[in-house]
Amino acid sequence: MPLLPSRLLALLVNLATATVFADVRLPALISDHMVLQARAPVPVWGWASPDEQVSVEIGKQKITTQAGANGAWRVELKPLKAGAHQVLTVRGANTLVVTDVLAGEVWLGSGQSNMGLQVKSANDFEAEKAAANWPEIRMFTVANNTSVTPLDDCRGKWEVCDAGAVGNFSAALYFFGRDLQQHLRVPLGLINSSWGGTPIQSWMPLEVLTNYAGYTAYLARMQSDLAAWPAREKKIQADLQAWEIADAAAKAAHQPEPQKPYNPGAPDSGRFMPGQIYNGMIHPLLPYRLRGAVWYQGENNAGGGEPGATDYTELQTRMIQSWRAAWALGGFPFYYVQLPNYNNNSWPWFREGQANVLKVPNTGMAVTIDIGEATNIHPKNKQEVGRRLALIALAKVYGEKGVFQGPQMARCKPSGAEIEIEFQHTDGGLVAHDGALRGFLVAGADKKWQPADARIAGERVIVNSPTVPQPEAVRYDWAGNPDGNLYNGAGLPAMPFRSDHWH
């Protein structure tokens, strides 16, 4: 066999070594302007050549490790004090320097479009933009992505909160973090991993779904939706063409733009497939240290009436458990938003399904039944959504004394022509906003619901109806867009409820 020319031999050697030796690399989350969780061990990880020596330095800490056979490496920093700009240096065959690193509180925000809705689309954007000088609040927005297998990295970058950046922040997550930062006076790191119009089934590992009783029925619905898609897509395209004509006419007449028809995409798109958003947008965040998570999702799952609501309780419970298992941080706090008032008669059942998730330890739910918009599925008052989520976290995580929940039905007792409802979380006393107490329905043995008169008596509400001489059950705010006005003295609304178990 003839000898290879020296130049060709050198080229082959260089190519061979290029496949063996690689620069040290960090995940997108570990980058300039990041916030690390304070007062807890913090993992730092990445990739290098197999068996390569890697060192990680921050402040007075220096930790050395060796990459595994697959090139992956990981170290754990000792707990950091909150505050202080720091530099993180990672050395291997090359050196990486991560600048402007803060330590503070880190929260993940996830869900669909109401978590994704940006500050520029929320109430009072110009005022919020002018006031957005919060250099210790940073947000990392995960780029939308799906995958059939779990990914180890994502796309995105940390942005420092200022007038130029805040418009693109998740509004609910930003207002949550801003309220925390103002109370705690420590840096806040916020990770926004959300995607509009997505079902909860896409946000959890596939293996969590395959042994769940409703999985077969879910796949059957997907197949049915897929079969109906060509006709639906044709109508959507016709609606879009009609909208373009109407939109042009509105602009020419200087009138408001008509609402654009929504095109959800084919039912077999990745974002609708079980597990695929988890693989592409949650798994890549592991094992970044978190304090907890907030969740705003459900509109995509809310159309199934009572059976669908029961199904969702099971699904959200499984999702919370799967995330906690993946991060291996124990039962970290998980707080979520109950869907607000909106003209959809399936939503009362769904809200009950969400409320039943409170049985999962270390969870909390922000009731928003009074701050939605009857005909807008994307209500703009995200300031109050964030505030109510922050109240829960401040009380349950950070030990601040304060009211974090509105009145909640504790028990009901029928007595002749009346039903007596006892409430908990009545801090400051029960209050009827804007006139006489309303929003209550009662029914007797015939199960026909009638509007009820209601009055406050201490921590109780007494209800009755002249058309129901012997009421057996009561419901409150049990409608898509109800008008109930029961609050506690702290201004937080009562949670919708029903005392019956009728179907």
Image: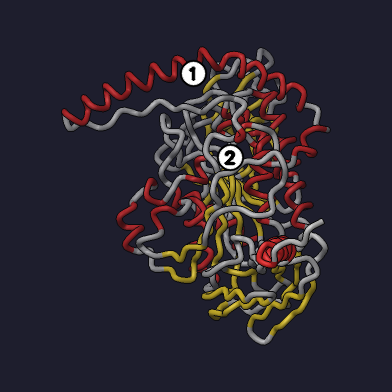
Eye-nearest disc, 2 or 1? 1
Identify whether 33 is placed above or below 219. below
Identify whether 70 is placed above or below 51. above
Residue 289 seen in this snapshot? no
For mark 2, what is the residue? 297
Residue 206 seen in this snapshot? yes
Identify whether 95 is placed above or below 130. below
Coordinates of residue 48 in the picture (x, y in percent) = 71, 66
In the image, taking residue 387 as reference, residue 268 lies left or right, namely right
Q: Quadrant of the N terminus?
A: bottom right
Badge 1 amino acid: Glu
Q: Residues within 10 Å of mark 2 (few under 14, many from 20)?
A: many
Q: Work out which residue is located at the far front of the displayed protein and give it.
A: 2
Dot 1: element: helix
Badge 2 amino acid: Gln
Residue at 57% across, 29% down? 347
Q: 182 or 457, which is in the foreground?
A: 182
Q: 11 or 176, which is in the foreground?
A: 11
Residue at 60% across, 74% down? 96
Figure quadrant of residue 79: bottom right
For mark 1, what is the residue? 233
Q: 314 or 1, which is in the foreground?
A: 1
Q: 81 or 225, which is in the foreground?
A: 225
Coordinates of residue 432 in the picture (x, y in percent) = 47, 42
Q: Work out which residue is located at the far left of the displayed protein and give it.
A: 253
